[in-house]
Image (cartoon, rainbow, N blue to C red):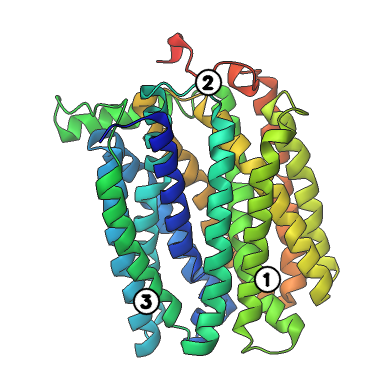
Amino acid sequence: MTFTAALVRRTYYALSLGNTLAASLIWGVNTILLLDAGLNNFEAFAANAFFTAGMVLFEVPTGIVADWWGRRASYLLGTVTLAVTTVLYVWLWQAGGPFWAWAAASVLIGLGFTFFSGATDAWLVDALRATGYAGTLDEVFARAQVFTGVGMLVGAAGGGYLAQVAGLGAPYLLRTGLLVVMFVLAAVLMRDLGFTPERGAGFRAEIGRIAGNSVRFGLRVRPVRWLMLAAPFTGGVTIYVAYALQPYLLELWGDSTAYGIAGLAAALLAAARIVGGLVTPYLGRVFIRRTSMLLVTLGPSVVVVLLIGLIPNFWAVLVLVVLWGLLGAAAEPVRQAYLNGMIPSQQRATVLSLDSLMASAGGVVSQPLLGRAADIWGYPFSYVLSAGLSALALPFVWLSRRERDPADIRSVEEAMPPERR
């Protein structure tokens, strides 16, 4: 098989579509399943916090696996881990498992996702450069976001209505089957192009070297550090806002068994993601600096989350959810391109995993906190509190902007400066 830049892009789009389709099948009903299993809001979001704690715990180790063993191997491990742990979730629901078992299963699901988080994007960027791709990363990430949006749209809406017709466990079983398909697809189409793992010093020595370099090329690079420090406030709040919409919309609708409504909300977010991916390349003509677009989208998204809490009306909240999704979708590929432009190839997967770890760390704290707030004061107040937390990301993005890194300018060549290699 001849690997070209076009084939690399198509493979990345296929992986993005399939992964998101499999993952999003449960997004519309996951919190509902936890509540149906007998957990309260605090316990349900604490279980989600254990999921993000698993991501915090395993992000950098699995990023090291991707940099030491290979990005393809990391992806394949992720599909297997997620398939097994998804089945475990269904078993716990049927058996009425205790909270500690839900917490343990959630940590393992977090492990599965960490095998993807840094490895897939790192594989894409290195493979594109190895095959002579001449375009910008923004364009590729934006197009991929359209595919992930399609996967979310089909998966979230379909999963919600599948749960309503066939039971809450059905979307989880379908997800397992899709993950098996993705394993086969990745085994055939992924190759570690433009990247050669360095294993000469032994595994333990390589772990120390890669982990040290991830800090050197991550947190010690000032514009990267500021961007990463914003992640706990944006990423952590985003997880809560999305998952709390499931029971909140059912509460506003007035029917706690209308699982299709929860799926509808996730589908609307998916549609917003598609539109955001389509418009991002055009917005790039307006904003020369990537951080300008990040600030312009982050500020209004804080206001939208605030309004979700202040206007507890079903139809108004639906409109606000779409707007919130559009803002986030427009910003995500820009942030990906900006961050990738500041990271050298050999440490790419590990540094990207470190960035994902920062977002997950925010989720570990924010989810039980906001879930407890919902138990005591209701969902509207928890959204007001979410808006306040997400606003704390703005100063860090501004500080990253002040560093004036070359990667902040879209017209600059995407390749890394020699001094950072």
Q: In which quarter of the image is the C terminus?
A: top left
Q: Which of 172 and 350 is in front in this view?
A: 172
Q: In which quarter of the image is the N terminus?
A: top left
Q: Which of 390 and 132 is in front in this view?
A: 132
Mark 3 and mark 2: Cα distance apart in space: 41 Å
Which amino acid, mark 1? Answer: Ala
Q: Which of 378 and 412 is in front in this view?
A: 412
In the visual, does 115 lie left or right of 363? left
Is any atom of residue 214 visible in this view? no
Q: Determine which quarter of the picture holds residue 309.
A: bottom right
Determine whether 98 is above or below 122 in the image: below
Q: Residues within 10 Å of mark 3 (few under 14, many from 20)?
A: some
Q: What residue is rendered at 57% in x and 23% in y?
A: 222
- Residue matched to label 3: 173
- Where is residue 265 shown, x and y percent of the image? 67, 70
Marks 2,1: beta carbons within 8 A: no
Which amino acid, mark 3? Answer: Leu
Determine whether 244 is above or below 128 in the image: below
Q: What residue is rendered at 48% in x and 18% in y?
A: 415
- Residue matched to label 2: 414
- Residue matched to label 1: 373
Residue, far top: 419
Q: Which mark is first along the chain, 1 or 2?
A: 1
Secondary element at image label 1: helix
- Where is residue 405 shown, x and y percent of the image? 61, 18
- Where is residue 279 shown, x and y percent of the image? 71, 42
Q: What residue is rendered at 61% in x and 89% in y?
A: 257
Secondary element at image label 2: loop
Q: Which mark is first along the chain, 2 or 3?
A: 3
In the visual, does 45 lie left or right of 216? right
Q: Which mark is first along the chain, 3 or 1?
A: 3
